[in-house]
Amino acid sequence: MQEYRLLLVDDEKDILKLLQYNFELEGMNVHTAQTGKDAIDLALSLIPNVILLDVMLPDIDGIEVCEILRKNPVLNNTIIIFLSARGEDYSQVAGYRAGADDYIVKPIRIKVLLHKIKALLDRNRDYNDFESINNMQIDSDRFSIMKDGKESIIPKKEFELLSYLMSSPDKVFRREEILSEVWGDAFIGDRTIDVHVRKLREKFGREIIRTVKGVGYRFMGN
């Protein structure tokens, strides 16, 4: 597996240690939480690719945690899998209704779990890779950007420019490529791209777009 961010949520330390060890062997960036509150806080700060969530937690029920997380658009593309000793049908149905992508009953078979997660990540790989860049999400219907949980609705050309640069993070786009793809046949001044890049930096930080002198621009990946 390539490196993904994984959040493990369980109140049993032994299970956390076992899972963390195995997932780190797969090259994943693993974080852990033992309470629902900590899980919510970490999820919103890390924007993990995958959350493995126990149902029975000491403070907030895992089902409620999942419902809370699913209401936040910044986590729309995060995979949530329940790992629980509760195998009753109603518990599993409640998990899926809360927004879970899968529900796995303990005891855990590590190899099976790894393959399940890999299959889910592969299914959403293109979207995840794009959306995880600098924790930014794009909504093409609203011409908005969600960054670190904050939504910004920006002008159409700024949106199109940012979307184009984000389509290949760390690639240097030549000025003529940008003009052709974003502005097409429209006649614009030489400084138009520079002005739009400056406005994007003012909104989202100078670090997101780097100038390659004499060539063009590139969007900086994580």
Image (cartoon, rainbow, N blue to C red):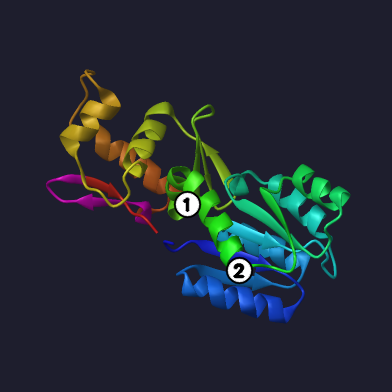
Q: Position of residue 160 (x, y in %)?
A: 37, 31
Find residue 41 and report its image quarter.
Answer: bottom right
| Residue at the farthest left position | 214
Residue at left offset 38%, top offset 41%: 199
Question: Which residue lies at the image location 47% right of the left edge and 52% below the top edge?
Answer: 132
Q: Quadrant of the C terminus?
A: bottom left
In this rendered view, identify the residue nearer to me: 169 or 126.
126
Q: Which residues are magenta?
A: 207-216
Q: Give the residue at x 75% y 64%.
A: 54
x%, y% of residue 55?
80, 61
Q: Is residue 221 left or right of residue 141?
A: left
Image position, residue 171 (x, y; %): 25, 48
How packed mark 1 is, by other alpha carbons closer than 10 Å (few <14, some 14-19, many 20 or more), is: many
Mark linked to residue 220: none
Q: Circle 1 — which element?
A: loop
Magenta span contains residue 211: yes
> Mark 2 sits on what residue?
110
Tag 1: amino acid: Ser
User: Nearest the camera: 51 or 108?
Assistant: 108
**The N terminus: image quadrant:** bottom left
Query: Which amino acid type is marked by label 2?
Result: Ile
List the residue tagged with mark 1: 132
**Residue 191 visible somewhere in the drawing:** no
Q: Determine whether 43 is above or below 89 in the image.
A: below
Q: Is 148 left or right of 66, judged from the image as shown? A: left
> Gap between marks 2 and 1, in whole Å?
26 Å
- SS of the residue under disc 2: helix
Between 123 and 47, the one lying in front of the other is 123
Residue 108 part of the magenta segment: no
Rendering quarter of residue 207: bottom left
